[in-house]
Amino acid sequence: VIVEDMKDLDYKDKFIGIWACASLLHLTEDEVLETIKRCHRALKKDGVLYVSFKYGEKNYEKDGRSFTCFTRDKILNLIESLDFYYKATFETGDVRPGRENEKWLNVILKKG
């Protein structure tokens, strides 16, 4: 396990999987794309990337934090130029008390 700033990820063909659960959502869309590019470089061939975001079309700020939201189409459009195979997206509900109406978009991609 390596813990570091995701924007500084600088590996090449090193990992078979990267798990980025509810972390990239605090970056801007441009930073999300750049970080996913870095993840792509860091993955070995056929490596898998998991990312999750708040589900929605509009980005927002709450309590001084930025949230970048995605729908299936929005994330696939963002990464269309990358050599990833789309494996799956699925929505899940937030399990924390008081947030039952919040939805998450989960994305699984495979490096070509």
Image (cartoon, helix red, strand yellow):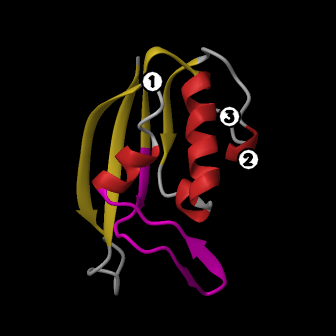
Say which amino acid is labelled 1: Asp
Distance from the alpha carbon under mark 1 to that under mark 3:
24 Å
Q: Secondary structure at mark 1?
A: loop
Q: Nearer the viewer, residue 93 or 76?
A: 76
The location of residue 48, given as percent across then percent down, is 41, 27
Q: Which is nearer the eye, 78 or 39?
A: 78
Q: Residues within 10 Å of mark 2 (few under 14, many from 20)?
A: few
Is residue 48 magenta-colored?
A: no
Total marks drawn?
Answer: 3
The amino acid marked with disc number 2 is Asp
Disc number placed over residue 83 in the picture, else none:
1
Q: Nearer the viewer, residue 59 or 39?
A: 59
Q: CA distance from mark 3 to mark 2?
A: 10 Å
Mark 2 or mark 1: name the one nearer the start of the chain. 2
Question: Is the residue 88 above or below the residue 72 in the image?
Answer: above
The first of marks 1 and 3 along the sequence is 3
Disc number lying in front (3 or 2): 2
Answer with the quarter of the image where residue 58 lies: bottom left
**Is residue 56 highlighted in magenta?**
yes
Give the number of the mark in front: 2 or 1. 1
Q: Can residue 99 be seen from the camera position used here?
A: yes
Q: Which mark is residue 5?
A: 2
- What residue is shown with label 3? 2
Residue type indicated by callout 3: Ile
Q: Which residues are magenta?
A: 51-71
